[in-house]
Image (cartoon, rainbow, N blue to C red):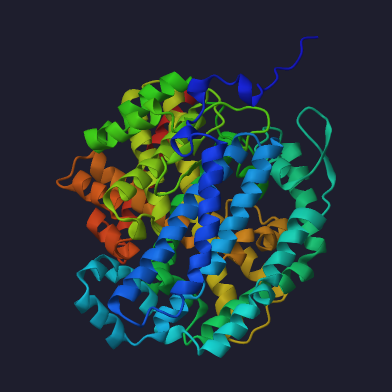
């Protein structure tokens, strides 16, 4: 028998397929020099602390000191984590990463006094400083963001008590994580090859995509048999976690935990409510897609374990990495030469770690600091999905590049609310390009299904999660106990509403709430759905070459955190306080669902 193909060791990967981290530090000696210098610079914090109110000059010096050490710490951390991720088995890089993580923690601790000290000064004092020293002007939005917290900041003694209890407030989430990732033991199940495999979270995801229906069914039932067994424990951890959200919001003077969470980025609560309202109005579209899934799978009954298996065979189109580079440039052409020039830089200057190797971190991401390139990690295989991943991560990296090239360090990053918009806009533009250029019905059907599945999983599913998350917060706030029975009943009804009467009412799905870690994140998931919707709207405008669409989009990419997220998106041409952008996304979904239904009929005939 021939030997299975082995992954190359890190030093066997061709240099042109690796990222060039010498642009951050030429060698380990340069890293150590920077590491030591920052360690010593942290000692200076004690000389800055307590001086902010003395004068405009001291106020400015305090801001610049804090930002400067964070800026240096980020470069050290990024270098260490990239080195570690390229070969996690390398003990030298493991140690490097551990030391860098520790230094970042020390940095945060050294300047933890900064925001409380700013808040201890009166508005009158602070704005007088701005009048006195024009160098402070660039920091106005930065300081305004801190001062916005004033109404919700408690007296120093109470803040100290809250800070001291932070581990206690987070303990329910920690217990869930340990239970979910370490202590739960799942049954052994049989895979497509008839082999017995130990069920894990990762294996579950793979087996739910199996083309063998018995494998999917048995895996689904096996997983949920464990969660059902511990439903009361998970109801207790989730309920306790929600109580901590509601308690902290109440004592800080917020009307709700949702207001407390969304106000951090000045997101109006109407954005959340509008998302849920509009998605509910368009649930018949999801029901249509689910019905098409049932038809294509050829089953008499459609179950929840049928939701993730591919409707079509593996994509009848493949790309090597070199071919994908060219296709990326072709697809993103509507974004203009300024954008494409950055994409070329990413390819030419080795921002991308392409090949899979032994010990390399799995998956894909874009990462970097203000003073580094926005690097991309891939684990390339010659598949269409990998092209989408490349385009997605390139969206993040170009967003970071434009932000850092056009904003000072203080505004050189962007919120999670904005982060996924740039990446999924790229995916939407790629989909439009492929549908314009590919004529093979099988290829087009695969591309359409790829889009529709992504839409289903991001807008419909994440909105379902958002609706459940708001329900559990409001139920607890109203004094109603979050028992496993109460949670499961609502989740079952919610799932039935979203997927419609075509899907069988599988008993197991009512326990899905118990295994979703995002319910411990505090009003986080809705941003996936709003971001994907906004990306659809932006991509459609850009591809259609609407007047000012591209210029507005580039303005968004360059804005960083110089303004609040809603205002940044207004500049991009999308008003996320109105339902229009979600309705526009639904229109694209409907149009592509129409085309897929027609194509399927052609292929069958």
**181 or 56: which is nearer to us?**
56
- Could you tell me residue 596's position as x and y percent? 42, 35
Residue 157 lies left or right of residue 486; in this view the side is left
Name of the residue lying farthest toward the left: 547
User: Which residue appears at 62% of the width and 75% of the height?
Assistant: 242
- Could you tell me residue 345's position as x and y percent? 34, 31
- Could you tell me residue 299's position as x and y percent? 64, 38
Relative vertical location of residue 112 with respect to residue 426 in this rendering, above or below: below
**Can you see residue 503?**
no
Relative vertical location of residue 467 with respect to residue 13 in this rendering, above or below: below
Residue 109 lies left or right of residue 409; in this view the side is right
User: Which residue appears at 37% of the width and 25% of the height?
Assistant: 348
On the rendered image, what quadrant is the N terminus found in? top right
**192 or 268: which is nearer to us?**
268
**Can you see residue 480?**
yes
- Could you tell me residue 42's position as x and y percent? 52, 63
Count of numbered tags:
0
Residue 177 lies left or right of residue 491; in this view the side is right
User: Which residue appears at 34% of the width and 62% of the height?
Assistant: 565
Relative vertical location of residue 602 with respect to residue 401 in this rendering, above or below: above
């Amino acid at each position: 028998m021939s030997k299975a193909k082995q992954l190359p060791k890190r030093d066997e990967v061709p240099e042109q397929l690796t990222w060039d981290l010498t642009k951050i530090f030429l060698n380990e000696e340069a890293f150590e020099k920077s590491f030591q210098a920052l360690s010593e610079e942290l000692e200076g914090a004690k000389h800055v602390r307590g001086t902010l109110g003395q004068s405009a000059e001291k106020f400015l010096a305090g801001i610049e000191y804090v930002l400067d050490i964070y800026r240096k710490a980020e470069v050290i951390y990024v270098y260490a984590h990239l080195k570690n991720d390229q070969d996690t088995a390398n003990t030298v890089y493991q140690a490097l990463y551990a030391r860098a993580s520790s230094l970042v923690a020390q940095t945060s601790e050294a300047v933890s006094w900064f925001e409380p000290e700013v808040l201890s000064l009166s508005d009158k004092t602070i704005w007088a400083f701005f009048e006195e020293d024009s160098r402070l002007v660039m920091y106005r939005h930065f300081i305004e963001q801190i001062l916005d917290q004033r109404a919700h900041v408690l007296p120093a003694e109470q803040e100290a008590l809250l800070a001291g209890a932070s581990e206690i407030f987070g303990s329910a989430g920690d217990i869930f994580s340990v239970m979910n990732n370490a202590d739960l033991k799942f049954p052994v199940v049989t895979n497509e090859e008839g082999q017995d495999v130990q069920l894990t979270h990762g294996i579950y995801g793979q087996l739910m995509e199996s083309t063998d229906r018995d494998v999917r069914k048995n895996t689904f039932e096996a997983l949920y048999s464990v969660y059902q067994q511990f439903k009361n424990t998970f109801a207790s951890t989730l309920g306790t976690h929600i109580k901590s959200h509601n308690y902290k919001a109440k004592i800080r003077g917020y009307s709700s935990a949702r207001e407390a969470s969304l106000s951090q980025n000045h997101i109006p609560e109407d954005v959340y409510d509008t998302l849920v309202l509009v998605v509910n109005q368009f649930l018949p579209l999801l029901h249509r897609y689910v019905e098409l899934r049932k038809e294509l799978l050829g089953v008499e009954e459609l179950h929840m374990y049928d939701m993730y298996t591919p409707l079509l065979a593996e994509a009848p189109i493949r790309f090597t990495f070199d071919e994908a580079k060219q296709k990326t440039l072709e697809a993103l052409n509507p974004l203009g030469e300024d954008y494409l020039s950055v994409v070329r830089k990413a390819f030419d200057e080795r921002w991308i770690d392409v090949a899979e190797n032994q010990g390399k971190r799995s998956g894909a991401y874009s990462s970097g600091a203000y003073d580094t390139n926005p690097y991309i990690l891939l684990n390339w295989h010659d598949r269409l999905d990998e092209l989408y991943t490349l385009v997605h991560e390139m969206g993040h990296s170009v967003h970071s590049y434009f932000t850092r090239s056009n904003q000072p360090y203080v505004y050189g990053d962007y919120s999670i609310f904005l982060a996924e918009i740039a990446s999924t806009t790229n995916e939407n533009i790629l989909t439009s390009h492929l549908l314009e250029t590919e004529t093979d019905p099988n290829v087009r059907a695969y591309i359409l299904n790829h889009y529709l599945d992504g839409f289903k999983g991001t807008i419909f599913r994440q909105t379902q999660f958002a609706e459940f998350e708001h329900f559990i917060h409001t139920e607890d706030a109203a004094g109603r106990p979050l028992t496993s029975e109460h949670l499961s009943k609502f989740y079952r009804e919610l799932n039935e509403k979203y997927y419609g009467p075509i899907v069988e009412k599988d008993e197991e799905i009512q326990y899905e709430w118990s295994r979703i870690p995002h319910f411990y994140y505090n009003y986080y998931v809705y941003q996936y759905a709003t971001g994907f919707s906004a990306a659809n709207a932006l991509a459609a405008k850009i591809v259609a070459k609407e007047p000012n669409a591209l210029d507005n989009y580039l303005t968004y990419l360059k804005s960083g955190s110089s303004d609040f997220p809603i205002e940044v998106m207004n500049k991009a041409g999308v008003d996320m306080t109105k339902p229009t952008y979600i309705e526009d996304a639904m229109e694209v979904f409907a149009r592509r669902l129409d085309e897929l239904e027609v194509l399927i009929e052609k292929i069958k005939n």
